[in-house]
Image (tube, grey):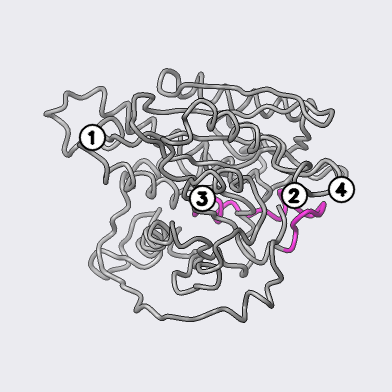
């Protein structure tokens, strides 16, 4: 991905409207007990955790150049996660194609095939060819692991809802009762082969967008949430809101983050282990940052651009400026923050739950 405008120029158009940050009380994370039991095990950088088959992060600790053995092994890991670990809940689609002398393969996973619309969650799994040996920890192993965990979490909810009789559920089914479905896309070929440009970048995104325009799928995409360059743990940068069309969804994501970081039941220190862990995280979202909302075009070139051009609302979760390890050999797992990655996994899980819940019949 690349910048679309110099930040100094954009800064001139920055108008600040301060909203009073609402901090209400009551820990409100959905299915907290599931996260407390599974999140740390799934997203972990401890040396011994690479032997744990439930680890969703460390299998990405390799180069993933399109068409390479590392790419094929990564694809196999992702596909097996959906076909075996999450068996029966997701439709698995592969989209192999060749362009510019390279073989690419998008992976598209769909929950709730009979939904009238879909929320698309996406990240790219490929890595740059140069510098040699780059494993793309923030670019974008962390985002892929967060999406794999989100799929695992949604599968848990759906399985629970389908196992119990409808009248025995404590509330309206969130996943099986929603008219909004979920697609999770792992794009191949986001990175340029030689030099970033319209014909040498976002290969997988351009290919999938063309297919969805041709077969009518694009008209049923409610929103695309694209994740990239997350998990660095650096004090800066923040993730701003880029598009006025999805600023409301950005505000929802921000409220969820505030829930995680600030809300407490009775003010006591007797909190759950998960609550105590996420409370140590920093804010990543700022709904009062309006720099980009009135521009009407992308500031960062990324996999979302062909979908944005097709009229799909886009929520782009990417920090700006980019983390310091971006496109360097230092973008490795030594510079990745597992706690930060878990933070984003929780945000996405809750965002999806609340999005589905708003569309239950």
- Between the C-alphas of marks 3 and 4, the distance is 27 Å
Camera-near label (2 vs 4) is 4
State whether residue 62 is above or below residue 80: below
Q: In the rendered structure, which segment of residues is drawn in magenta? A: 324-344
Camera-near label (3 vs 4) is 4
**Residue for point 72% across, 37% down:** 189
- Between the C-alphas of marks 1 and 2, the distance is 40 Å
Q: Which structural element holds mark 4?
A: loop
- Between the C-alphas of marks 4 and 1, the distance is 47 Å
Residue 185: percent from the left, percent from the top?
55, 35
Q: Which residue is mark 2?
A: 332
Is-magenta flag for residue 316?
no
- Between the C-alphas of marks 1 and 3, the distance is 25 Å
Q: Which residue is mark 1?
A: 173
Q: Determine which quarter of the picture holds residue 291.
A: bottom right
Q: Looking at the image, is mark 2 or mark 4 earlier in the sequence?
A: 4
Q: Looking at the image, is mark 3 or mark 4 earlier in the sequence?
A: 4
Q: Looking at the image, is mark 4 or mark 1 earlier in the sequence?
A: 4
Dot 2, how many residues are within 10 Å of its Cα: few (below 14), some (14-19), or many (20+)?
many
Q: Which residue is mark 4?
A: 131
**Residue for point 46% across, 33% down:** 183
State whether residue 341 is above or below residue 234: above
State whether residue 70 is above or below residue 32: above
Dot 3, how many residues are within 10 Å of its Cα: few (below 14), some (14-19), or many (20+)?
many
Dot 4, how many residues are within 10 Å of its Cα: few (below 14), some (14-19), or many (20+)?
few
- Between the C-alphas of marks 2 and 3, the distance is 17 Å
Q: Looking at the image, is mark 1 or mark 3 earlier in the sequence?
A: 1
Q: Which structural element holds mark 1?
A: loop
Q: Looking at the image, is mark 1 or mark 2 earlier in the sequence?
A: 1
Q: Nearer the viewer, residue 34 or 76?
A: 76
Q: Which residue is mark 3?
A: 342
């Amino acid at each position: 991905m690349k910048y679309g405008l110099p930040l100094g120029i954009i800064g001139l158009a920055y108008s600040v409207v301060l909203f009073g940050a609402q901090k209400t009380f009551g820990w409100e994370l959905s299915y907290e007990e599931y996260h407390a039991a599974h999140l740390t095990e799934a997203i972990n950088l401890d040396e011994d955790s690479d032997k744990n088959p439930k680890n969703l992060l460390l299998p990405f600790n390799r180069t993933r150049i399109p068409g390479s053995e590392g790419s094929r092994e990564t694809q196999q890991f992702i596909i097996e996660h959906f076909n075996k670990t999450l068996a029966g809940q997701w439709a698995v689609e592969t989209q192999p194609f060749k362009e510019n002398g390279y073989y690419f393969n998008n992976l598209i996973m769909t929950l709730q095939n009979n939904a009238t619309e879909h929320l698309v969650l996406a990240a790219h799994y490929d890595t740059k060819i140069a510098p040699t040996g780059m494993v793309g920890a923030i670019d974008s192993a962390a985002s892929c692991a967060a999406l794999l965990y989100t799929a695992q979490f949604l599968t848990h909810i759906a399985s629970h809802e389908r196992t119990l009789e409808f009248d025995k559920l404590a509330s309206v089914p969130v996943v099986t009762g929603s008219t909004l479905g979920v697609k999770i896309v792992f794009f191949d070929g986001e990175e340029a082969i030689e030099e970033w440009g319209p014909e040498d970048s976002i290969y997988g995104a351009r290919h999938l967008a063309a297919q969805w325009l041709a077969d009518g799928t694009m008209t049923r995409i409610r929103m695309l949430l694209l994740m990239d360059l997350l998990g660095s743990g650096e004090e800066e940068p923040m993730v701003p809101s880029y598009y006025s069309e999805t600023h409301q969804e950005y505000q929802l994501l921000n409220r969820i983050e505030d829930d995680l970081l600030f809300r407490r039941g009775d003010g006591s220190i007797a909190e759950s282990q998960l609550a105590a862990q996420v409370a140590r995280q920093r804010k990543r979202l700022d709904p009062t940052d309006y720099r980009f909302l009135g521009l009407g075009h992308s500031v960062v070139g990324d996999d979302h651009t062909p979908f944005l051009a097709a009229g799909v609302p886009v929520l782009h979760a990417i920090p700006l400026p980019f983390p310091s390890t971006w496109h360097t050999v230092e973008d490795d797992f030594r510079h990745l923050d597992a706690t930060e990655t878990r933070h984003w996994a929780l945000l996405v899980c809750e965002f999806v739950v609340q999005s589905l819940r708003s569309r239950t019949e």
